[in-house]
Image: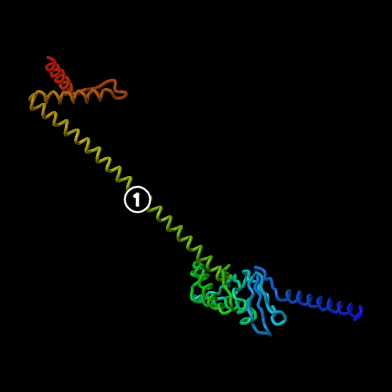
Amino acid sequence: MNIEDIITNLVGLNGLALFLAFFLIVAVLMAVRIVPQSEKYVVERFGKLRSVLSPGINVIVPVVDRVAHRISILERQLPTMTQDAITSDNVLVQVDTSVFYRIIEPEKTVYRIRDVDGAISTTVAGIVRSEIGNMDLDQVQSNRSSLINATKEQLANQVDDWGIEVTRAEILDVNLDEATRAAMLQQLNAERARRALVTEAEGKKRATELEADGQLYAAEQEAKARRIEADAEAYATAIVADAITEHGLESAQYQVALKQVEALHKLGSGDGNQTIVLPAHALEAFGNAFKFLGGRGA
């Protein structure tokens, strides 16, 4: 074998080695799949589901296996949906809803439903109409939380076969037509007027009660004053009686005369009373008083 043959063989061997090395590198690149944290890969083998690759480094069979679907597992929000519904008291309302969900089993989502967003929107519309049909308008307005919970629960049960988890279901707004709005506004104004009348009546009632309490209190105080005055007079009478018992009739006559003098003194102390005309018995009262005073002084 000459040198040219050896060189030719070496070149052939090197070419084969380079080819094998290139093929190996390509095979490794095709076999190794690095899946991002926010995704999952659905792998098919000859058009049939083979496996689902989780985030991280994964290995598949080159050429035979292929990544058919790259599915995001991040939470998604459907666009705000508006649907008409009729309450149990025959009021037409428009309900704005929004749904948040995420895919947890991509193989079900890929092979069991074509348009997952459209399917969820249709399901939500049916659930909301059904729930509102069992409620009157006041319940829809006041029990929105129960409507949200019922919608989320029923939606979660129906989309379970699609590999979807419903994280949130929101009732954003409940809109009414103009006629219903006007009727509700009229009712609200009537209710406010009724409350105002009730408040005014209660105020008048309270004022009457307070006035009656004031009059009763005044009467009680007056009765107490009269009772005290009566007690004082009774006490004075008792003292006079004791004095009569102790000192006899002379003491009683002294008390009567003293009262007569006091009365005349008050009569003379009035404004403009410079001249006083006294009857004869008044002078006798003075004389008796001085007589008794003199006698007591002695």
Picture coordinates of residue 286, whole percent (x, y): 17, 20
Q: Counting other residues with Cα less than 10 Å from the Cα at mark 1, is it few (<14), some (14-19), or many (20 or more)?
A: few
In the figure, residue 32 lies in which quadrant? bottom right
Describe residue 82's horizontal placement relative to residue 281 as left or right.
right
Q: Residue furthest front?
A: 1
Q: Nearer the viewer, residue 223 or 277?
A: 223
The image position of residue 121, as x and y in percent, is: 61, 76
What colour scheme has been applied to the protein in the rendered image?
A: rainbow
**Residue plotted at (89% across, 77% down):** 7
User: Is residue 215 visible to us here?
Assistant: yes
Q: Nearer the viewer, residue 263 or 209?
A: 209
The reply, left or right, for residue 34 in relation to residue 236 is right
Above or below for 187 versus 291 = below
Q: Which residue is mark 1?
A: 209
In the picture, the quarter occupied by the N terminus is bottom right
Q: Amino acid at mark 1?
A: Glu
Q: How many marks?
A: 1
Looking at the image, residue 296 lies above or below residue 23: above
SS state under label 1: helix
Residue occupying the point 48% across, 60% down: 192
Q: Quadrant of residue 159?
A: bottom right
The foreground one among 161 and 121 is 161
Let me know if residue 96 appears in the view: no
Q: Residue 39 lies in what quarter of the image?
A: bottom right
- Residue 139 percent across, percent down from the top left: 48, 70
The quadrant of the image that shows the C terminus is top left
Relative to the observer, which residue lies in front, 24 or 225? 24
Query: Residue reaching furthest top?
Result: 298
